């Protein structure tokens, strides 16, 4: 009940309390101690010093890099050789071409199968087997021709017997006619007791018998001529068969190919389907006369090359050369120019006014790796000098008809005039201006 009679006062009835306002205070200034200023100065000074050192190092590296990019070379002294390079292929001066057999008959254009073939690089001796071609049907054909020859000989003997019978018949006819003539003569002896008509008939009978006898006499040599002609025809037929047989027998022998000389076997290349070119191998279909291989003498190798017509004026017989083979970069062999073409020839695909001169360079040294058909180059020596002062060709500068080089002096290079007497593809011989040991600039 007390709660109902004495209610709590509402917030509106409560009396507000007074709070005293607080005055704002001004911000206080913090002072930096002197040690902080000292540390700050040390950091800034160290940063500036490090930057200066780094910048100086960068400048020095740039200078060293600039100096390093200048390519230089040293002037040398020694033997000098001016050469001209000729490109060609290696071949052998002593060799034998081995080709597929050529048949002598209607079968001359037929392809043949290669049954056996010697391996590439084999050393062979004379009369050693190199290859064998399948004779195929030719062996059976030879047997058929033998039967034909035997039959032709039998025909000759048979015809001779028939001619003997015919000749005997002609001689028998001649004897009968001779008897008729004798009888007619005997009958004519009794003409005195005969009438005129009978005498005339007897005379006519005698003339007829004589004429028949003479005709029979002429038939004997004529028949002999006919018989001789028949035998000759049969003989010619038999001889034709015999020659046909001998031709094929020689063809069968030619299907086995033997080496005509001692040397190294080098297989030839053959075109296959799709334009592919590979060495000839067993099982290939070859055409008559197709190259199969070469037997070469490795001690007689040479380089066959061609030179421009303008370059031919500096090539002479007997000049020495250094020969290199592209397949073996380290191979260097000595050679000698031994043949120069007398006439310049034009190429198949070149313009008519472009002419080349064939040159052959014998290889004076041997190497087991050296085989024919290798691309090679020969540096033919045109001129040599001893104790020559040589400068790289890249160091020579030409200005106004004069030659100059840049010789290193201290940190730089000084321009100096030189006298060039001759040069090759790499070096120039100078007679004045520099000496051995000088460093010259190349670019």
Image (spheres, rainbow, N blue to C red):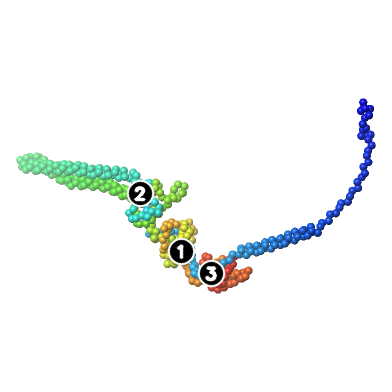
Outermost residue on the top side: it is: 1
Name the side, left or right, on which 114 lies relative to 225: right
Q: Which residue is mark 3?
A: 76
Establish if 367 lies above or below 396. Answer: above
- Give the Cα separation between the discs numbered 3 and 2: 62 Å
Residue at (36% x, 50% y) in the render: 131
Q: Considering only order in the chain, which callout, 2 or 3, is on the residue closer to the N terminus?
A: 3
Establish if 352 lies above or below 156. Answer: below
Q: Which one is in front, 163 or 328?
A: 328
Q: Which residue is mark 1?
A: 322
Q: Which one is in front, 150 or 319?
A: 319
Q: Position of residue 72 (x, y in %)?
A: 58, 66
Q: Which residue is mark 2?
A: 132
**Residue 82 makes an appearance in the image:** yes
Q: Which structural element holds mark 1?
A: strand
| Quadrant the N terminus occupies | top right
Q: Position of residue 116 (x, y in %)?
A: 37, 48
């Amino acid at each position: 009940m007390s709660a109902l009679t004495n209610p709590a006062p509402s917030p509106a009835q409560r009396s507000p309390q007074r709070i005293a306002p607080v005055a704002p205070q001004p911000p206080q200034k913090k002072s930096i101690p002197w040690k902080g200023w000292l540390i700050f100065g040390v950091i800034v000074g160290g940063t500036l010093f490090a930057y200066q050192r780094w910048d100086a190092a960068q400048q020095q590296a740039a200078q060293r890099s600039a100096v390093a990019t200048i390519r230089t070379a040293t002037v040398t002294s020694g033997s000098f050789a001016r050469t001209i390079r000729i490109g060609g292929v290696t071949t052998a001066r002593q060799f034998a071409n081995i080709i597929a057999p050529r048949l002598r008959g209607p079968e001359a254009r037929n392809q043949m199968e290669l049954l056996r073939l010697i391996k590439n690089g084999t050393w062979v001796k004379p009369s050693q087997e190199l290859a064998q071609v399948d004779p195929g049907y030719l062996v059976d054909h030879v047997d058929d021709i033998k039967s034909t020859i035997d039959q032709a000989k039998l025909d000759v003997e048979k015809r001779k017997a028939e001619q003997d019978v015919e000749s005997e018949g002609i001689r028998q006819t001649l004897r009968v006619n001779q008897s008729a003539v004798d009888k007619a003569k005997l009958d004519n002896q009794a003409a005195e007791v005969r009438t005129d008509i009978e005498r005339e008939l007897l005379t006519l009978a005698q003339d007829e018998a004589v004429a028949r006898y003479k005709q029979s006499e002429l038939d004997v040599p004529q028949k002999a001529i006919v018989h001789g002609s028949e035998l000759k025809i049969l003989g010619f037929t038999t001889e034709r068969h015999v020659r046909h047989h001998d031709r094929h027998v020689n063809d069968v022998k030619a299907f086995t190919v033997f080496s005509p000389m001692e040397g190294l076997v080098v297989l030839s290349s053959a075109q296959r389907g799709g334009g592919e070119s590979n060495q000839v191998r067993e099982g290939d279909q070859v055409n008559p006369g197709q190259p199969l291989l070469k037997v070469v003498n490795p001690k007689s190798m040479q380089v066959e090359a061609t030179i421009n017509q303008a370059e031919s004026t500096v090539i002479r017989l007997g000049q020495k050369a250094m020969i290199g083979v592209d397949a073996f970069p380290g191979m260097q062999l000595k050679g000698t120019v031994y043949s120069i073409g007398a006439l310049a020839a034009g190429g198949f695909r070149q313009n008519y006014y472009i002419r080349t001169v064939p040159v052959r360079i014998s290889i004076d040294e041997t190497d087991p790796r050296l085989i024919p058909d290798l691309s090679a180059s020969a540096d033919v020596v045109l001129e040599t000098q001893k104790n020559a002062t040589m400068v790289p060709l890249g160091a020579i500068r030409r200005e106004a008809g004069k030659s100059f080089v840049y010789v290193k002096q201290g940190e730089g290079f000084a321009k100096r005039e030189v006298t060039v007497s001759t040069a090759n593809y790499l070096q120039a011989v100078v007679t004045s201006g520099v000496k051995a040991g000088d460093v010259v600039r190349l670019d």
